[in-house]
Amino acid sequence: MTVMLASARTEIAGYLSTLIYVYTLLIVVYIVTQLLFAFGVRPPYSRLTDAVLTFLRDVCEPYLRIFRRIIPMFGAFDFSPIVAIIVLSLVGNVIVSLIHG
């Protein structure tokens, strides 16, 4: 019973760690696409690109909005995504280590 519980905790910690990693990658991809748009790069319209960009915005923007309210922009620079990724990583590592035991 103890081995099964430890195995379940390890699997949950691994799943959560992977989920945080994937979400961090999604945030990075979202920020890179926003940077490209800021520099004037516009991909030709297609349903696929529109669906991907809408998905990225819908998934990343609510989390990033929390930090954009707190951290002011410095000129044209928005440091809130960097802080959001650092907080996500730190909190994720703490939670994973607590679950893992």
Image (spheres, rainbow, N blue to C red):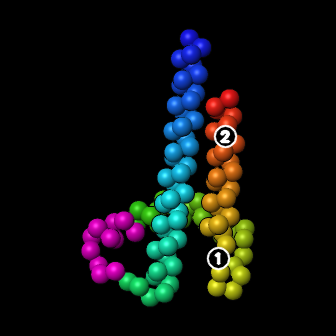
Q: Quadrant of residue 70?
A: bottom right
The residue furthest top is 1
Q: Is residue 7 above or below residue 65?
A: above
Left or right of 46 in this view: 2: right
Q: Is residue 24 above or below residue 91?
A: below
Report the magenta stretch's main SS: helix
Q: Quadrant where the N terminus lies?
A: top right
Q: Please state the extent of the stretch shown in magenta in the rendering.
A: 43-53
SS at mark 1?
Answer: loop
Circles 2 and 1, Cβ within 8 Å, touching? The answer is: no
Q: Is residue 33 above or below residue 88?
A: below
Is residue 29 rendered magenta in the image? no
Residue at figure coordinates x 67%, y 59% from the top left: 86
Residue at figure coordinates x 64%, y 61% from the top left: 84
- The reply to whether residue 66 is visible in this rendering is no
Estimate the spatial distance between the alpha carbons at disc 2 and disc 1, rounded to whole Å. Answer: 27 Å
Residue where numbered disc 1 is placed: 78
Mark identifier at residue 95: 2
Residue at figure coordinates x 68%, y 64% from the top left: 83
- The reply to whether residue 14 is visible in this rendering is yes
Residue at figure coordinates x 68%, y 56% from the top left: 87
Q: Residue type at mark 1?
A: Asp
Q: Position of residue 18 (x, y in %)?
A: 51, 45
